[in-house]
Amino acid sequence: MITAAPWVAFFGLLGIFARWGIQLAAVRSLGLPVHGATFGINALGSLLIGVVAGIAQVRPGAISEPLRAGLTVGFLGGFTTFSAFSIESWSLLSQGQWGRGAAIFIGSPVLGLGCAALGIAAVRYGLA
């Protein structure tokens, strides 16, 4: 059995550089604000993880498990974490797990925003 770890590491590196390059190009060439570029990257990452998940579901065996992990956890994890949030929320909701799906769908951005604010506050007040 081929382990997914090298795939995740390799594609993760590619995802990080893809995000950086696209964000830089969008800000410099298109004049987008950084958050506008991030918004677009998050949408694109969500679309791409949906495509990979769709291929894996509709065409079993078309993508090996190590390659699927490399593309989703590695590339798209490095490219954007929003893609994982999107597909995980969709999976739960589409399986009828409304409570869990809603908790993740609503809780993740609220928690993320709260944690970001907490981190900023910790730095501002010399706690970190």
Image: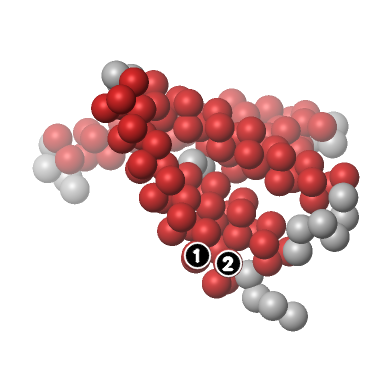
Q: Amino acid at mark 1?
A: Phe
Q: Secondary structure at mark 1?
A: helix
Q: Nearer the viewer, residue 128 or 50?
A: 50
Instruction: Specify whether residue 113 is in view.
Output: no
Which residue is the extreme one toward the bottom? 1
Which residue in the structure is indicated by mark 1?
A: 10
Q: Quadrant of residue 28?
A: top left
Which residue is the extreme one toward the front? 29
Q: Residue at x 70, y 38 (%)?
A: 50
Q: Residue at x 46, y 55 (%)?
A: 14
Q: Quadrant of residue 43?
A: top right
Q: Position of residue 12 (x, y in %)?
A: 48, 57
Q: Which mark is residue 7?
A: 2
Q: Residue at x 60, y 43 (%)?
A: 84
Q: Is residue 63 above or below residue 28?
A: below
Is there a contact, CB below 8 Å, between mark 2 and mark 1?
Answer: yes
Quarter of the picture holding the N terminus = bottom right
Q: Position of residue 90 (x, y in %)?
A: 72, 33
How far apart, in angstroms, are the residues tagged by discs 2 and 1? 5 Å
Q: Residue at x 53, y 52 (%)?
A: 75
Q: Is residue 32 left or right of residue 43?
A: left
Q: Amino acid at mark 2?
A: Trp
Q: Is residue 104 left or right of residue 63?
A: left
Q: Quadrant of residue 35?
A: top left
